[in-house]
Amino acid sequence: MLFHSSIRRELAQSFGATLVVLFTIVLTILLIRTLGLASRGSVNPEEVMLVLGYTVLGRMPTILTLALFISIVFTLSRMYRDSEMIIWLASGRSLGGFIGPVLRFAWPVLLVITLMVLFVWPWANQQTEELRDRFARRGDLERVAPGQFQESSSGRRVFFIDKDTASGTEGRNIFISSIEPDGRETITSARSGRIEWVGEQQMLMLSNGQRLEIDADQGGMKVSEFELYGVQVGASARITARGLGLKARPSRQLIEEPTQAHLGELGWRIGMPLAAFNFVLIALATTTGNPRAGRGGNLLFTLFAFVFYFNLLNLGQNWVALNLVSLGTFMLLLHGSVFVLASLWLLKRHHNISLRGLLAPRRAQTTGLETQPA
């Protein structure tokens, strides 16, 4: 039908343009943030684009939800402004008749949001955490650049290497200053060194050097020379992966281990597609147009409604995690109440119901009784 195809075509054009704009804005913001993390040493500078890609992929459900909401509001606002809505309503179409074509356009987007928030969101966060964790747990010598003093990951050692080989496994004129757990300070220097694996430990084997031990508590000092000395500089080859963060845990694990924190995260993930569906109803129910006014009012309302709803979703996640409210109660109060209010508002506009219209017959009846002769 012309009615359905024209609305879906305009919604697709508006959705595509909105998605490109939002994606560009979010990409720019996340790029600046990722570069800041790389400059602080939290992210490997060589993996900035990879971290950025995973981060943007995890933000796509929110971007798609906002783009869908804005596209519906903009399309309906344009139809009101250009009096096209009046033509459709005068030809026998009602506001409720727009539900069909809008939902037929929106359901693939809603399906993508659901799949991404349940599966892609935790996977992208898991990949990002692994990249950061791998960079944080890299060997001490991998942090060192020739000719520069560099602190180790534990903060107890300072390395200096004058020159190294192209492979990065050997170096010359090595200096190491470290503070032992018992409080002793050691200063080790050697003419050369190489990286070797001894069992499961990564070791720096120093050759032709000197070791100075200083005991600050007792005031003693010990100097020793060596031909070969080994220092552990890397982590074990078998590194047990740390526990994944809450946002990086698969949805199946959240269901199988229903702790309060898991239920809160699960409520957020399930709530995203429900919120996206409610935004479709909100756009249909509340969007109006004035030919003499612009679309600024509808745009402000769209942004305010999205921010308010999204903050309630995050707040509800914390409430469920703190066991202040159950998951079912939270889902019913937030998403259920929004669905009912949006449906009632849409029903009111569909039947053109107003409070003045409901009170008018009662007022007329009261006035008629007062004017009847005794």
Image: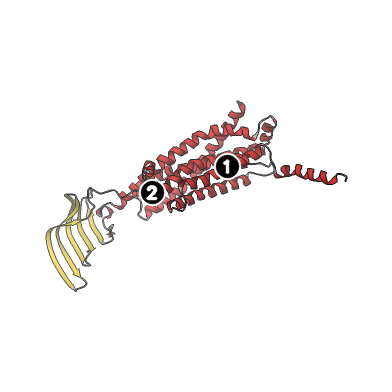
Query: Who's the residue at 29% across and 48% down the image?
Result: 241
Q: Is residue 257 left or right of residue 10?
A: left
Q: Can residue 344 be seen by looking at this rendering?
A: yes
Q: Is residue 332 above or below residue 79?
A: below
Q: Secondary structure at mark 1?
A: helix
Q: Residues within 10 Å of mark 1 (few under 14, many from 20)?
A: few
* Nearest the eye: 89 or 339: 339
On the image, the x and y values in percent for residue 312 come to: 51, 50
Q: Residue 159's spot in the image, x, y percent?
A: 25, 59
Label 2, on which residue? Answer: 259
Please state the horizontal and vertical placement of residue 239, each as a whole percent of the image.
Answer: 25, 49
Task: Tell me if mark 2 has few (under 14), some (14-19) or many (20+) residues whose alpha carbon lies within 10 angstroms of its own.
Answer: some
Residue 20 appears anywhere in the view: no
Question: What label sits on residue 340 in the rendered view?
Answer: 1
- Say left or right for 58 vs 147: right
Q: Quadrant of the N terminus?
A: top right
